[in-house]
Image (spheres, grey):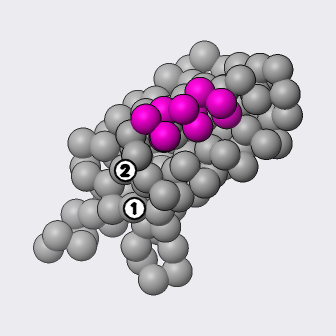
Amino acid sequence: DYKHVESMSKFAQLEFEHGSPERARTIYDTLIEKHPKRLDLLFVYVDKEVKHGELATARNIFVNVISPSDDGHRKNAKYSDKQMKSLFKKWFRIEEEHGDEDSREAVKAAARDFVERTAAAKS
């Protein structure tokens, strides 16, 4: 299964570069849905969106991953605090390079919100 995931990820990258970005998104969405703990897939997906000038799409990917669903749980997976820190750091680095002060503040606010939610859930 590992080689299949890697092959599909590579295929999606090639679709972004030489084919249909929409097909690439579909492949990545499916891969991430089936392997939600694979942050490497998520980060490659986000990097490809940013590289192709789709900063809003990249932001939406992060928002969908970090936002709790209606029942208070994260939609895709229960990420560890360490994984969430990596997600926020990645998002913030992208905003440092491509965003503005408001977008960087939005990441910080999302991170604070996450910390407050998890602290409340643990107490």
Return the x and y of residue 82 as percentages of the image width and height.
24, 42
Left or right of residue 22: residue 36: left
Amino acid type, label 2: Lys
The quarter of the displayed image where residue 47 is located: top right
Please tell me which residue is depicted at 82% across the width and 42% down the height of the picture: 22
Q: Answer few, some or many: residues within 10 Å of disc 2's Cα (few below 14, many 20 plus, some between 14 and 19).
A: some
Left or right of residue 60: residue 23: right
Amino acid type, label 1: Ala
Please tell me which residue is depicted at 51% across the width and 73% down the height of the picture: 69
Q: Report the disc number at residue 37.
A: 2
Closer to the camera in the image, 13 or 85: 13
Q: Report the disc number at residue 33.
A: none
Q: Report the disc number at residue 77.
A: 1
Q: Is residue 18 visible?
A: yes
Return the x and y of residue 98 as percentages of the image width and height.
67, 20
Closer to the camera in the image, 114 or 38: 38
Q: Answer few, some or many: residues within 10 Å of disc 1's Cα (few below 14, many 20 plus, some between 14 and 19).
A: some
Q: Is there a contact, CB below 8 Å, between mark 1 and mark 2?
A: yes
Please, what secondary structure does the residue beneath circle 2 have? loop
The span shown in magenta is 3-12
Residue 31, compared with residue 55, is above or below; it is below
Return the x and y of residue 121 as percentages of the image width and height.
24, 73
Please tell me which residue is depicted at 72% across the width and 49% down the height of the picture: 26
